[in-house]
Amino acid sequence: MADEVILLDFWPSMFGMRVRIALAEKGIEYQYREEDLMNKSPLLLKMNPVHKKIPVLIHNGKPVCESLIAVEYIDEVWKDKAQILPSDPYQRAQARFWADYVDKKVNAVARNVWATKGEEQEAAKKEFIEILKVLEGELGDKPYFGGETFGLTDISLIGYYCWFYAYETFGIFSIESECPKLIAWAKRCMEKESVSKSLADPHKVYDFVLGMKKRHGQE
Amino acid sequence: MAEEVMLIGAKGSPFTRRVETALKMKGVQYEFMEEDVSNKSPLLLKYNPVHKKIPVLLHNGKPICESLVIIEYIDETWKGTPILPEDPYERAKARFWAKFMDDKCLQPLWKSCSSQGEEQEKAKEEACELLKILDNELKDKKFFGGDTIGLADIAANFISHWFLIIQEVTGVEVSTKDKYPKLYEWIDEFVNCSIIKENLHPKEELVAVFRGRLQAATATK
């Protein structure tokens, strides 16, 4: 039976990128549908009535919402290749813990790095670097967060990498100088086709953020 | 091989309770270490250096943190009553609703009773919308997990116990049986489940914990 897989997404979304990467890792054919977040499609509102957000993975008509939940779903359904979560329960718990850390900590702070000014921005930059340093500490000398293989935690974080140029430009700081190991990790991930094809162009992300700032009267 | 399972937690915490429920569902013997969250122990800071929060499960000396992560670990490690379903789609739904409780419901429900003025009014409005969503989700089933309790029901323990008590203690009325009939039916079923019933904290204990928390919340304003 042919599977029908649709992804409702928005090109600069680091959450959408997580699902794109997982689908690419597994070699799954799917239909990508770009959503206009100012004018959400009836399909999006029907498939995610609770949050009305992207990404939404629709598998044979059934919706899976929330990016990390969709990634785990993909891993469980298409289990014969490119395992995303490790087999050992303790390692799985660590992967989920760190993916959850990325979700809880990175997003809110990252937004303030580009969306605020003055003291508020300085505080956001400081917190952002602190969070990245914690992640860098967890990575250690491993090639990926999960060890030898690319996995859930890597997928949860890597989408932010294409936003770093925008953060650095608007925040006037260098992430690489503070977290060189993390940047090395990101470049290693970008060598994977599943990642390089799923992430947005950093300059386009910058233009997008500039557009958002202008709309909110910040530029 | 003798297993060593220890749970570092706090009696009044719904997050700790969730983990205890999961352990009891699997019949796991464990040692409980009560943590004074206002004066965190070196052990807690050692085993959860990132968040410094309870609950922390220690299994043969290895720590697992974050209640929902811990519950999935428990489900994968010990056989017995399953906490998550087997079907990947049903698992995704269970995780969705558990996350919904944590990400969306906890703060507004707590604030609807513990805050004041405009903040409280806004939180009450939000709480009502959220409870309506939950009430609607339960329209065709007994539990969030279907016929038996699962991850999402355990995650919703805040609503089945704590929220009702907070409303009683503060005198604030946000949820009623008339407004959310299905939710109240769920509360009844959930609380009467033997695994939950046998392990309920005495109400007075929870009331005392919440009076303390509310005092602290108003004192910091």
Image: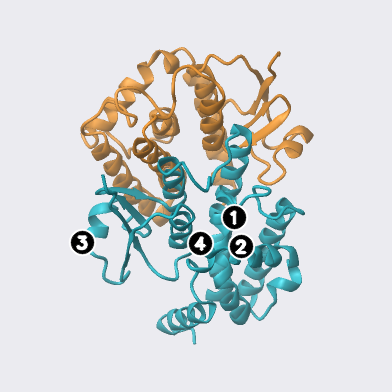
Chain colours: A cyan, B orange
Whichever of callouts 1 and 4 sits on the residue coming sooner in the sequence is 1
Instruction: Answer with left or right where residue B193 lies relative to residue B213.
Output: left
Please say if A193 is above or below A1. Answer: below
Quarter of the image where one finds residue A86: top right
In this rendering, would B216 be left or right of A40? right
Calculate the distance from the C-alpha at mark 1 to the C-alpha at mark 3: 32 Å
Judged by depth in the image, the label closer to the viewer, 4 or 3, is 4
> What secondary structure is marked by label 1?
helix
Chain letter behind tag 3: A
Q: Mark 1 vs mark 3: same chain? A: yes
Of the residues tagged 2 and 3, which is closer to the observer? 2
Q: CA distance from mark 4 to mark 3?
A: 29 Å
Q: Residue A189: give its label.
A: 2
**Which amino acid does the dot numbered 3 rest on?**
Pro
Chain of the residue under label 4: A
Return the mark for residue A42: 3
**Residue in the picture at 71% in, 51% down:** A138
Residue behind mark 1:
A154
Asked if A89 appears above or below B221 in the picture, the reply is: above
**Residue with the mark numbered 4:** A194
Q: Are marks 1 and 2 in contact (CB under 8 Å)?
A: yes
Secondary structure of residue under mark 2:
helix
The kind of residue tagged 1 is Asp
B178 and A27: which one is in front? A27
Mark pair 1, 4: CA separation: 12 Å
Q: Determine crowd level at label 1: few under 14, some 14-19, many 20+ residues with C-alpha closer than 10 A.
A: many
